[in-house]
């Protein structure tokens, strides 16, 4: 199991922006897929996006609003969120999976990810 540490959550007004960060070890950063998930109260965990093998995938609900980037100087994966909506309110998690097990058609399956961060709360409200 690997350690992942999220940060950057908080309260933001609708239409605002927020950047989440997921700090990992260099080994995980270089060789594993990193997924972002979220879970709202009473709802199932939902895949938001994933970076794997220099590719990024996004759910339809966040495509064109959220962007994943990687900072190789800090072994950190970022989730830049813009045009935030109240329905984006959730606890956001990053997770790591073996690259060989993540593809364009299964990246959002939470069961493929073996290590998870503790989560960070994002609240979008006026």
Image (cartoon, rainbow, N blue to C red):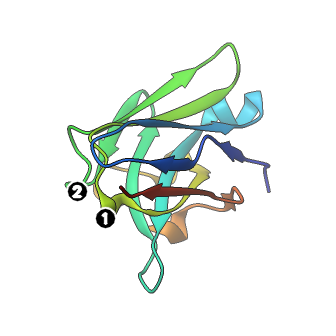
**Above or below 31: residue 94:** below
Give the image location of residue 52, x and y in percent: 45, 38
Q: Quadrant of residue 27?
A: top right
- Nearest the camera: 36 or 33? 36
Give the number of the mark in front: 2 or 1.
Answer: 1
Q: Residue at x 71, y 20 (%)?
A: 74
Residue 13 position, x and y percent, is: 37, 47
The CA span between labels 2 and 1 is: 10 Å
The structure residue drawn at horizontal position 53% and vertical position 32%, both measured from the top left corner, is 78
The residue sitting at the top extreme is 73
Asked if labels 1 and 2 touch by Cβ distance under 8 angstroms, the answer is yes
- Say if residue 120 shows up in the picture: yes
Can see residue 107? no
Pointer 2: residues within 10 angstroms few (<14), some, or many (20+)? few
**Secondary structure type for disc 2:** loop
Q: Is 87 displayed left or right of 6 in the figure?
A: left
Extreme bottom residue here?
A: 42
Q: Dot 1, crowdedness within 10 Å: few (<14), some or many (≥20)?
A: few
Residue annotated with mark 2? 61
Q: Is residue 34 left or right of residue 4?
A: left
Quarter the N terminus occupies: bottom right
- In the image, 126 versus 85, the foreground residue is 126
Relative image position of residue 51 (x, y in whole percent):
44, 38
Task: Assign the C terminus to one quadrant of the image.
Answer: bottom left
Q: Which residue is mark 1?
A: 87
Label ID, residue 46: none
* Residue closest to the eye, 62 or 111: 62
Residue positioned 53% across, 43% down in the render: 33
């Amino acid at each position: 199991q690997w350690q992942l540490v999220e940060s950057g959550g908080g309260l933001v007004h609708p239409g605002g922006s927020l950047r989440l960060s997921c700090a990992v070890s260099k080994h995980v950063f270089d060789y594993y897929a990193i997924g972002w998930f979220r879970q709202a109260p009473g709802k199932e965990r939902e895949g938001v996006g994933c970076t794997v093998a220099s590719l990024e995938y996004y759910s339809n609900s966040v495509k064109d609003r959220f962007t994943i980037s990687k900072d190789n100087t800090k072994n950190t994966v970022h989730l830049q969120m813009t045009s935030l909506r109240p329905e984006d309110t959730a606890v956001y998690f990053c997770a790591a999976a073996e690259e060989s097990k993540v593809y364009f058609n299964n990246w959002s399956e939470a069961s493929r990810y073996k290590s998870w961060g503790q989560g960070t709360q994002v609240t979008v409200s006026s």
